[in-house]
Image (cartoon, rainbow, N blue to C red):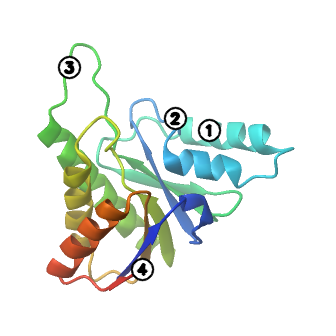
Amino acid sequence: MIVQLFQGDIGLVGAEGLVCPVDGVICTLGGSAAATALKHSFDPEERDELFSYLEQDVKGLRPILHGESRIIPGEGRWDWLVIVAALPHHANDVIISEEHFASVLEKAVANGIRMSCRQEIGSLAMTVMGSSYRVPAQIAIQRAVNAISDCRHEDIRVNWCFLDKILLASAQKLLVKAGIPVDC
């Protein structure tokens, strides 16, 4: 495995597959950075229609157990969408702890990488997931690094995108400490 770190918009990063985080219960692409990049990769005249079709494909996967993943054909810039059930929501009076959420995130990322390798997908683009309101960014990054480390022997390139250069530097430091080859 090789990890390449990018600072900027994931929509500008090439890869065969795009990692799209969802809540496995409802399975909607929502407004994540990956979903936004996917939508904007379509021709503006077809954007809403194509995104609606993909959204229906993703909804058809439900339920996906939290921590699991699925792969569907992509559109636009990416040939494959790696749907990871990494974003559980509080529901029915059940409050998900930060630790449980972080554990689900780690498991989902690792499962997405492994499933991509089984499908012979050679490269993935992903963002920092779950840091907008579920866990602090540092915890989300550490758990993604743990997942990458668990999959270190897989034959895949992970293109990991960051908007914040401080978070990118933190991820680079954690990856190097874990012995993962990193390109910047």
Specify the label residue 55 is tagged with.
Answer: 1
Q: Nearer the viewer, residue 85 or 144?
A: 144
Looking at the rendered structure, the secondary structure element under dot 4 is loop
Circles 2 and 1: CB atoms closer than 8 Å: yes
Circles 2 and 3: CB atoms closer than 8 Å: no
The residue to which callout 3 is attached is: 94
Seen in the image, is 159 located left or right of residue 41?
left
The residue to which callout 2 is attached is: 28
Q: Nearer the viewer, residue 5 or 92?
A: 5
Q: Position of residue 6 (x, y in %)?
A: 45, 70
Can the viewer see residue 60?
no
Q: Amino acid at mark 3?
A: Val
Can the viewer see residue 36?
yes
Q: Amino acid at mark 4?
A: Ile
Looking at the rendered structure, the secondary structure element under dot 1 is helix
Gap in angstroms between the C-alphas marked 3 and 1: 26 Å
Question: Between disc 2 and disc 3, whose residue precedes?
Answer: 2
Q: Quadrant of residue 51?
A: top right
The residue to which callout 4 is attached is: 156
